[in-house]
Image (cartoon, grey):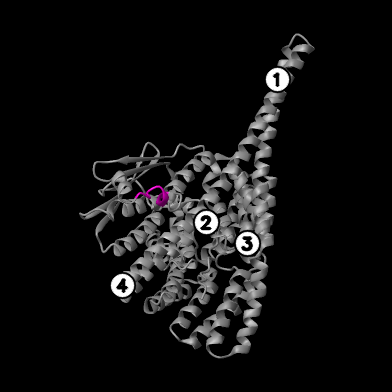
């Protein structure tokens, strides 16, 4: 079954949640306040931040926030305009299931923050909301970099850790999901964020139950539901009920599962959130199918599919992308207009101070020629970047079949020469390697942690095939964060393969592969070193070193193309040692 974890947090720019009593006190101040000034705007927004979490079904919130926006605009109160736009975006996003309109408001708020350095601290909220839109459209490759980037904000680190955990959960990477959820809970406990703890406990319980850890899943689910009831956390009640329904379904308590699924649907009607309603219907249909109530299950599956088609479809994704592109284009146009105005000012000064029309014409011609050359250079650079990107995709496409072909050869050799049980174990390791490979093969960049997982999986297979005739070690310098550093996927694998095939497999003594990652002067230095027989002796023994080094050639070409696209100076250096070979790959240090 496809994992579904609901990300249903309200990303307002203010802090946390509070009790109704505190919100009511602010409302009393607003009623008594008689002056239309910035203090009134701040009071209204504080009231929204505290009260809207408690009453998400209230249909008057949109009008209330639009009135606040109008007041802030009349006062020319920039901060108030930014916050009101963001809050209206939240309402369209979560309460009205209209991410396209929400995106307009988020982008307006973000644009204001970019123009005002004192308001940049609010960018976290808009970026998070935009990341969640990509998440809900199942565009995880766009959502994940945003969430990782936002880890730098300590006040919301717990939220970003849980968002990353959600994506890993949806991609069925259970270990990674559990790791990030637990890290999120630890951070939320440090800041005493009860809403976040309850939300993540619910998602953790779901992932654990889907991974077969039923007792742990039930415990975390019960903990979350108890917090929601005792603290009145209405904002996450519905998604928590959806999660609870699936957790109880995995424990074969179908009656309780159906109860929570039905309750989630009853509650969602007042919220008008199509995203969560779709998940509720899907879960209820699955439970009814397990109970043998096929007619109701079919009806709910159909209803869920209709909603899902309206939520996640190509047209909507294209429109979201169009809005993002238009936003970037508008920014560039604004910069271009500002530059044009500056050039006109310079030109006018020159004209005013010139001694005649000839000089003015000459200057105008010089300006025109410079602009023409600049435009041509920009177009040429854009074209070259596009060509290089196509080349890079082609090289990645060559790399994947080559890698899989060599791995399948390894399996064939092992099955022919060893017992069935070992072959089965080998196939299991290969399946894990293929899963990791396929997950990362279409990505331009992956984290160093993900690449190390790939290398470990590959080396474990080869170590087993060669009866553990070699050892391997992967070391990372202390100043490198493996979850932050980025590099192209499977870049080192061909060099590791060469070390095994041409160096260690023909060595009469026990061999070792040492892989190191370190940062030197803003460069990522990756080293693959072995103590095998070396390239020259290997070539003398079998004479087909060149033929079997296709992967190395492709990797060198990949780095050359990357240098074109990124204007970088990556390099590969192969050093023949007295015993063995050392490969040094140098890349620009890229961080998430």
Tag on residue 366?
A: 1
Q: Position of residue 551 (x, y in %)?
A: 43, 51
Instruction: State the separation of the CA atoms marked 2 and 1.
Output: 46 Å
Q: Mark 2 highlights which residue? A: 442
Q: Nearer the viewer, mark 4 or mark 1?
A: 4
Inter-mark Cα distance, 4 to 1: 75 Å
**Does the rendering let one see residue 570?**
yes
Label 4's element? helix
Measure the alpha-carbon separation of dots 2 and 3: 30 Å
The magenta-colored residue range is: 543-549
Given this view, does label 2 or label 3 mark the residue nearer the observer? 2
Is 60 part of what is drawn in magenta?
no
Point out the tag, 2 or 3, that comes first from the N-terminus: 3
For numbered disc 2, what is the local secondary structure? loop
- Numbered tag placed on residue 422 in the rendering: 4
Q: Nearer the viewer, mark 2 or mark 1?
A: 2
Q: Quadrant of residue 89?
A: bottom right
Q: Which residue is mark 3?
A: 93
């Amino acid at each position: 079954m496809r994992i579904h974890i609901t990300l249903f947090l309200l990303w307002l720019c203010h802090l946390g949640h509070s009790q109704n009593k505190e919100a009511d006190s602010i409302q009393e101040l607003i009623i008594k306040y008689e002056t239309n000034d910035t203090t009134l705007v701040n009071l209204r927004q504080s009231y929204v931040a505290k009260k809207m979490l408690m009453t998400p079904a209230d249909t008057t919130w949109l009008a209330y926030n639009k009135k606040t926006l109008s007041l802030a605009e009349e006062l020319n109160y920039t901060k108030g305009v930014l916050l009101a736009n963001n809050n209206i975006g939240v309402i369209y996003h979560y309460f009205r299931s209209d991410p396209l309109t929400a995106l307009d408001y988020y982008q307006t708020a973000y644009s204001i923050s970019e123009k005002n350095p004192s308001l940049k601290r609010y960018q976290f909220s808009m970026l998070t909301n935009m990341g969640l839109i990509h998440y809900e459209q199942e565009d995880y490759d766009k959502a994940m970099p945003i969430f990782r980037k936002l880890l730098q904000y300590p006040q919301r680190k717990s939220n970003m850790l849980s968002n990353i955990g959600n994506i890993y959960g949806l991609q069925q990477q259970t270990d990674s999901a559990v790791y990030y959820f637990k890290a999120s809970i630890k951070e939320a406990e440090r800041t005493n964020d009860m809403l976040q703890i309850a939300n993540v406990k619910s998602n953790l319980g779901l992932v654990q139950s889907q991974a077969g850890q039923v007792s742990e899943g039930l415990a975390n689910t019960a903990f979350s539901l108890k917090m929601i009831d005792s603290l009145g956390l209405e904002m996450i009640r519905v998604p928590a009920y959806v999660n609870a329904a699936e957790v109880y379904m995995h424990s074969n308590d179908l009656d309780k599962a159906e109860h929570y699924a039905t309750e989630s649907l009853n509650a969602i009607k007042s919220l008008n959130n199509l995203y969560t309603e779709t998940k509720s219907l899907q879960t209820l249909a699955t439970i009814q199918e397990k109970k043998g109530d096929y007619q109701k299950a079919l009806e709910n599956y159909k209803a869920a599919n209709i909603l899902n088609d309206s939520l996640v479809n190509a047209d909507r994704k294209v429109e979201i992308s169009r809005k993002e592109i238009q936003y970037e284009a508008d920014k560039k146009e604004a910069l271009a207009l500002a530059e044009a105005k500056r050039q006109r000012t310079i030109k006018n000064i020159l004209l005013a101070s010139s001694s005649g029309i000839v000089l003015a014409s000459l200057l105008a011609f010089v300006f025109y020629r410079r602009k023409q050359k600049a435009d041509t250079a920009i177009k040429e650079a854009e074209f070259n970047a596009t060509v290089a990107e196509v080349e890079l995709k082609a090289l990645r496409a060559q790399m994947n079949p080559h890698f899989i072909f060599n791995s399948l050869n390894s399996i064939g050799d092992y099955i022919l020469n060893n017992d069935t049980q070992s072959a089965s174990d080998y196939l299991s390791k290969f399946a894990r390697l293929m899963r990791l490979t396929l997950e990362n093969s279409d990505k331009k960049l992956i984290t160093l942690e993900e690449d190390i997982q790939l290398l470990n999986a590959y080396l474990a297979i080869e170590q087993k095939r060669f009866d553990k005739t070699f050892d391997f070690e992967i070391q990372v310098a202390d100043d490198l964060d493996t979850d932050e550093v980025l590099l192209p996927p499977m870049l080192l694998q061909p060099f590791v393969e060469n070390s095994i095939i041409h160096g260690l497999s023909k060595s009469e003594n026990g061999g070792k592969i040492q892989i190191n990652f370190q940062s030197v002067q803003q460069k990522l230095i990756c080293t693959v070193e072995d103590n095998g027989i070396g390239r020259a002796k290997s070539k003398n023994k079998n004479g087909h070193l060149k033929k079997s080094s296709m992967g190395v050639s492709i990797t060198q070409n990949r780095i050359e193309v990357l240098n074109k696209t990124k204007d970088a100076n990556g390099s590969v250096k192969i050093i023949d040692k007295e015993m063995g070979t050392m490969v040094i790959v140098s890349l620009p240090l890229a961080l998430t």
